[in-house]
Amino acid sequence: MTTWLNMSLQDGASPIMEQLVFFHDHVLMIMLMITTTVSYMMITLIRNKQTSRFMLEGQMIETTWTIAPAIILVFIAMPSLRLLYLMDEVHNPSLTLKAVGHQWYWSYEYSDFTKLEFDSYMIPQEEQQESTFRLLDTDNRIVLPMNSPIRMIVTAADVLHSWTIPSLGVKTDATPGRLNQTSFSISRPGVLYGQCSEICGANHSFMPITIESVPAKYFINWVSKMSE
Ligand SMILES: [Cu+2]
């Protein structure tokens, strides 16, 4: 989760998010090179009189500075498209979780099991304990097995919401009357936090998302306990 003074992205908790962080850094390096070159050129232009009576055209330099940016763009577009299609893919999921956005809480359905559904409300400030994170913890956490491909189905019951977990690289719009699909696999155990990312009304800031990622055998225990 994000803590104070964390300026960059959160650590990736899924293979896709790790790749997204690498891509972000890669693009920043390209931007650094461009900014350096352009600032150097601008400063030289200001500090020198670069005029010549005999120079009317420079075919070579003009061709170069037209083609070079195009090549740079290819180096950004290729990894970007690769990631886009990787995120779109749903590889034979072992579990499906349905999230429904309401004003203002999330409800979840584990459609692979019978009777396994619950609402997930934020823990109000008065009921906080030492271990709860303000505005981020919920009364019922989503429990998911780590290292298994999970299919998310996201929808809403009233207005637009958006189901988001930054450390998984997942953000899916919850739209009434529509099922959106995304998928991820969590690479380590822990608690992952997220918040609704669509301005959805007065209590938009108070409908957090909490995932408890656990080894598969603990997940099975939890399922059998929940569906009793
Ligand atoms: Cu919302």
Image: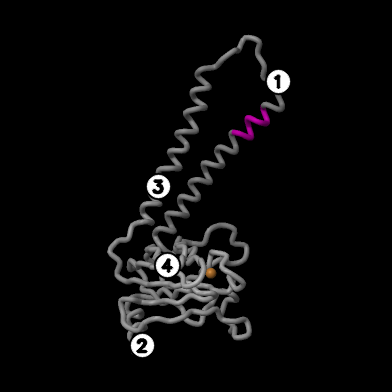
Q: Amino acid at mark 4?
A: Gly
- Marks 4/2: CA distance? 32 Å
The relative height of residue 143 versus residue 62 in the rendered view (above or below) is below
Q: Amino acid at mark 3?
A: Leu
Identify the disc placed on residue 177: 4
Tell me if residue 159 is in the magenta stretch.
no
N-terminal label among 1 and 4: 1
N-terminal label among 4 and 3: 3
N-terminal label among 1 and 3: 1
Q: Is the C-beta of the residue carrying label 3 under 8 Å from the nearest atom of ligand 1? A: no
User: Pointer 2: what residue?
Assistant: 225
Residue 161, given in percent of the width and then of the height, sits at 51, 67
Q: In the figure, residue 204 lies in which quadrant?
A: bottom right
Residue at disc 3, secondary structure: helix
User: Pointer 3: what residue?
Assistant: 81
Dot 4 crowding, Cα within 10 Å, few <14, some 14–19, many 20+: few
Q: Amino acid at mark 1?
A: Lys
